[in-house]
Image (cartoon, grey):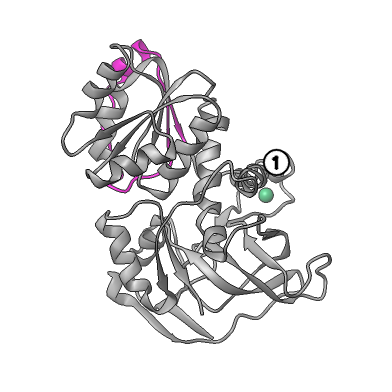
Amino acid sequence: MKAVVFREHGGPEKLTFEEVPTPRTGPEEVLVRVKACALNHLDIWIRQGIPAYQIPLPHISGSDVAGVVEAVGERVEGIAVGSRVFVSPGLSCWRCEQCLAGRDNLCPTYGILGAKVDGGYAEFVAVPARNVLPIPDGLTFEQAAAFPLVSVTAWHMLFTLADLKPGETVLVMGAGSGVGSMAVQMAKLVGARVITTVGSEDKIVKAKELGADEVIQHSKEEVAARVKALTGGRGVDVVFEHIGPEVWEACLHAMTRGGRLVTCGATTGGEVKLDLRYLFSRQLTLKGSYMGTRAELLAVAALIGRGKLRPIIDRIYPLRDARAAQEQLLSRRVFGKIVLKVE
Ligand code: ZN
């Protein structure tokens, strides 16, 4: 099959489009003919190489896959060849106490398709049968690939960890990111007031179209001060964060007393400063988040199927142009998801 692989860690130039063996399908696996695969920042970390992700090389990235079932393993039941499916990106054991309690993203063996094992930058991918789910009605393959990872992440952060409630105010960092574009919509769906940030003028209108009540252009305005002004000096109840040191202090200072901050990313670096006196005297809560549960993915897929949430796609590239697609993601000139289309 054709796939985009890298044989050593490094820059986007390490990605090559080439012929590789089609994956073998295990007895409890499904072979999916990939139609679309969305990009995530994770793909960039994996390609660059970081200690948290030790992977054998060569490697195929891609965590968000939609396609058609090509073949099923001998012990797989209830999945028909030819059905249109998307793939849950979370891989876990389904035997440990966390999995059995429905907290599969806390499984000691938890990993992500395209990070732990080869992913969807390819014509075919083999995945556990239990990870294959029907595409919600009315969605294209590109749309079905654009929502799983970011929507399960955003849902887990906003509702399970931050416990966002109707009437509260949330600051969603980076409406133009995949995860931010989902978080803005989800927070509006439950009746929260949404303040969000964007990096350029052209993204202001797009953020408002998602439902944001207020949009701060962080390249021109001081985020914490603007949030304070927009909330009558109070600050927000919840901060939805994934950017890291570049915005960290603004996020802390944008919170009201008792505020909750949840973070799932570090696109500008991994280390931040924290004054413990500020943390305890203002009674803040900081939580780290990684993906979400299968039940949460089913919940968001249902909402997407009913048109309550929209996967936002910035641009679609052919698979062979994965390098250009990753370069666009790195440029930040993106609003929503970048998707690879497999012919
Ligand atoms: Zn487990």
Q: Position of residue 99 (x, y in %)?
A: 70, 45
Q: Quadrant of the N terminus?
A: bottom right
Q: Tag 1: residue type? A: Gly
Instruction: Judge the density around disc 1: few (<14), some (14-19), many (≥20) Cα neighbours within 10 Å.
Output: some
Q: Residue at x 49, y 31 (%)?
A: 188
Please give left or right for residue 285 compared with residue 142 in the image.
Answer: left
Can I make out residue 10 in this image?
no
Q: Residue at x 52, y 68 (%)?
A: 36
Report which quarter residue 225 is drawn in: top left
Q: Residue at x 43, y 61 (%)?
A: 39
On screen, residue 215 above or below 118: above
> Number of callouts in the render?
1
On screen, residue 203 above or below 164: below
Please give left or right for residue 329 compared with residue 190 in the image.
Answer: left
Q: Position of residue 80 (x, y in %)?
A: 79, 71
Q: Position of residue 163 (x, y in %)?
A: 54, 25
Report which quarter residue 27 is drawn in: bottom right
Q: Position of residue 256 (x, y in %)?
A: 36, 15
Report which quarter residue 243 is drawn in: top left
The verdict on label 1 being within 8 Å of ligand 1 is: no
Tell which of 229 and 122 is nearer to you.
Answer: 229
Q: Which residues are magenta?
A: 261-288
Tell which of 114 and 142 is nearer to you.
Answer: 142
Q: Which residue is mark 1?
A: 102
Q: Residue at x 50, y 51 (%)?
A: 311
Can I make out residue 94 in this image?
yes
Tell which of 114 and 274 is nearer to you.
Answer: 114
